[in-house]
Amino acid sequence: MDTSLICPRFESAISILSQRWTGLIIYQLLSGPQRFSQLTESIGISGRLLSERLKNLEANGLVTRTVYPETPVRIEYQLTEKGIALKPVMDEIQNWSQAWVKPVETK
Amino acid sequence: MDTSLICPRFESAISILSQRWTGLIIYQLLSGPQRFSQLTESIGISGRLLSERLKNLEANGLVTRTVYPETPVRIEYQLTEKGIALKPVMDEIQNWSQAWVKPVETK
DNA sequence: TATCATAAGTTACATAAAGTAACTGAATGG
DNA sequence: CCATTCAGTTACTTTATGTAACTTATGATA
């Protein structure tokens, strides 16, 4: 049941960002378009979940998928304007982490 | 396995914020100390998970728990300085949601 | 004293999401 | 035709989340 009193837009935003891995995917894509295998390696996510997350981000209009029919095929994911607009959020998370997270604490 | 190439502090921050409910809990507590039952109602989280999340936030130094031995007992949760420092992050999420999230989209 | 009410959890169990590793499909080079 | 490479998908196990009933502590009420 959802009896929340919080602004629905804010909740929607949080529900995207609080999904595991999506924050890191967006963070990575902020440095430019990347292909599937690059993302799995840099983030440490499995193909199964990366595939699921990217579909979701595409459906939410944050990411576009471009196929380059080379050999072997190259597929690049990049942020839309809506996705790039999350940069200030990521910047603030970065600021906070530099100021408050000790290098050791992992969880 | 974690073969990530991302800054460990940033990853740590993201791992806290990308845990379901923690963002909303912090957001709620930014408007002042609140008790357990208030949080369950405003957020729409179950007691089981709220309890677990608050313990976690306490362990991470984001929240403090204060017992007021009244009748019935009152227990208030409030953000530490470290927790309050997340306000800019929440503000940016708010900004983004106002600019980019359509009122309808729920997921 | 016995019973009741209330806040703040906890426990036990069902369902959903995430982790893992092997597999598939398309395209081309040998 | 066989091997290789990228981009996924499938089948299965483990972990996290949801739900609802239960517990504990404290004082109020009969």
Image: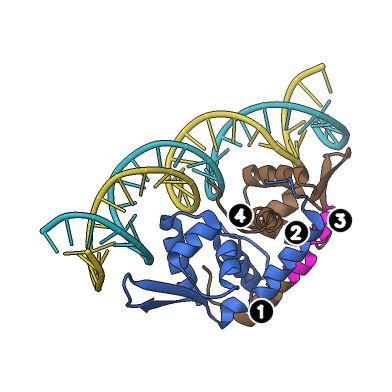
Chain colours: A blue, B brown, C yellow, D cyan
Q: Amino acid at mark 1?
A: Gln
**Viewer-side label of 3, 1:** 3
Closer to the eye: label 2 or 1: 2
| Subunit of label 2 | A
> Would residue B42 be seen by someone viewing this image from the given angle?
no
Q: Earlier in the sequence, mark 3 or mark 4?
A: 4
Contact? badges 3 and 1 (CB < 8 Å):
no
Same subunit, labels 3 and 2: the answer reads no
Q: Residues within 10 Å of mark 1 (few under 14, many from 20)?
A: some
**How far apart are labels 2 and 4 at the CA level?**
19 Å
Q: Which mark is residue A97?
A: 2
| Residue topped by disc 3 | B81
The label on residue B86 is: none
Nearer the observer: mark 2 or 4; the answer is 2
> Residue A6, how many percent across, how many down?
68, 66
Q: Which residues are magenta?
A: B79-91
What residue is at 71 percent from the left and 44 percent from the top? B56
Which mark is nearer the camera, 3 or 4? Answer: 3
Alpha carbon separation for disc pair 3 and 1: 27 Å
Mark 4 = which residue?
A: B20
